[in-house]
Amino acid sequence: MSQTSGGNTNAPGRRAMSRRGLLAGAGAGAVTGAVAGVAGTWGAEVASAETGASAFGPVTIRPGDPRYDTLLRGNNFRFAGRPDEIRVCGSTDQVVRAVSDAARSGRRVAVRSGGHCFENLTGDPAVRMLLDLSPMDEVAYDARRRAFAVQPGATLGHVYRTLFKGWGVTIPAGSCPGVGAGGHFSGGGYGALSRRYGSVVDHLYGVEVVVVDRDGTARAVVATREPGDPNRDLWWAHTGGGGGNFGVVTRYWLRSPGAAGADPAKLLPPSPQRMLQQTVIWSWERMTERALTGLLRNFGDWHERNSAPGSPHAGLYGILHVSHRAGGTAMLNVQIDADLPEADDLVSEFVSAVTAGVGLTPVLDLRRTLPWLHPMTWPGTGEAGDLLTRRYKIKAGYLRRGFTEAQLAAVHRNLTNTTGGPESGILLIGYGGEVGTVAPGATAIAQRDVVMKAVYQTIWSDEKDDAANLAWVRRLYRDVYAGTGGVPVPGAVDDGSYINYADADLADPKWNTSGVPAQTLYYKDNYPRLQRVKARWDPRNVFRHALAVEPPRAG
């Protein structure tokens, strides 16, 4: 769920950057024909052919098993529950049986694919059965649907490699190769190519989902974007409605809207051949308030001017990552398809615009061109932490325009205080472009006219430092959004937040005093429709967590 990719691995301060840059960097599986539900039979219950000996599992791991403690944690070591069992599944049939067992026994169930959830949604102590879908990692072309099928355990790196090697195509997903498709896709998904090609879900053709009926029966169904599909609302809910809300996704199908014919190489965006990247790093030694706010203001101004659909700058993706003063650096990363017209000039113009008038001399200024797969699949880049730093807290907000002057002052105050650590900081991430061609109600992603995402993060290693790190990032966030109750209430500047950057504080009245519910911050006017989908497909409220879509209230 995180969107990142690699910067300069040989740059000074690499150790700090590799941990601090959780969302920074140069960018921040299925069996063909295995299920029913092709055009004309959308409503049919899935009849899986995955029962052969080749399917992995199922494996049931309970307390006392030597594997249990290792498999409790995902990427964020802050969270580890104590479920009765961890069910490792290798097929849709196995997921159906597992969900059926949980529903019959009344046990809370949660799903993990890649394990990169930012919040305690799968490690909640109330979860009694944890489904591990990591073995379900196949990526294949489904000729019957003219779409690429991706299982939820497939990591983004695996997806990119398979699509590229087999057909020379790609999707505009994130740049952290270890993130699983399961959660990333259902929350919307975006990355270095989104300004050019939109969000991942803009290319989502269909989903296979294990749901639980009112009588407690678990079954797998297929839902597509086809206008005549009676299950279409379930497809729509997975175009940004977030994971763990409606059922267990066991397969996605991807095909770009309007893609015609049966040639797989023409059904998704073509992969770039080469990516032109530039990384500029400045030291905090000469980072005045004027320089810092100038960088942030310039970055916002450029995106306000150059984020309309069809803009010649839509192929350019930039991230501005400013650490706390204790971290020592500010970093600008930009990348673009090196074969786009005037790509080199577009990068130069962007860097010049962001640095205009700030009076800073970089300690590193590196431009290079790399093959497409290198920055998108390089192991370790963009992952949260290393062997030591595996604890983090992420908060976020959409921006329809650059920060206000009051927000810029709040950022500076918190990045220069005495309580922040070397792995703390803020990122501005470019967005907009092709994303804005989709109507707010066409998918569950309501924020379609935003130009940036803001990310506030802190990363650390020891449990004893939890309180200090959480306090720092929460105060930063509350200060930036002081004018709207401590959260990014939709308005002229801010536009809520992104569900894949899950933050349970938005549902906590201690930190959200705006009176605007967390679900409105994430989904805006699309939330009532998501509730109706919830009522239809999860009438027993089997799938729930701290930020879940809630069933509509009776009456």
Image (cartoon, rainbow, N blue to C red):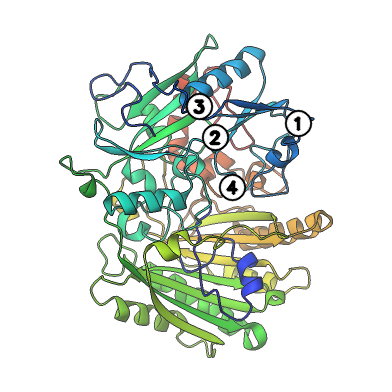
Residue located farthest toward the left when viewing the structure as drawn: 261
Residue located beneath label 1 in the image:
65
Question: For the view shown, which residue lies furthest in the right direction?
Answer: 464
Q: Residue type at mark 1?
A: Asp
Residue 269 left/right relative to 49: left
How far apart, in angstroms, are the residues tagged by discs 3 and 2? 13 Å
Q: Is residue 428 left or right of residue 129?
A: left
The earlier-in-sequence mark between 1 and 2 is 1
**What secondary structure is found at the residue carrying circle 1?**
loop
Q: Are dots 3 and 2 in contact, CB under 8 Å?
A: no
Please tell me whether mark 4 sits on a helix, a strand or a loop.
loop
Q: Nearer the viewer, mark 1 or mark 2?
A: 1
Q: CA distance from mark 1 to mark 2?
A: 19 Å
Say few, some or many: other residues with alpha carbon within 10 Å of mark 4 (under 14 / 14 to 19 / 20 or more). Answer: many
Nearest-to-viewer mark from 4 and 1:
1
Q: Which mark is residue 116?
A: 4
Q: CA distance from mark 3 to mark 1?
A: 28 Å
Which disc number belongs to residue 337? none
Q: Disc 3 or 1, which lies upstream in sequence?
A: 1
Q: Which residue is mark 2?
A: 133
524 and 418: which is toward the camera = 418
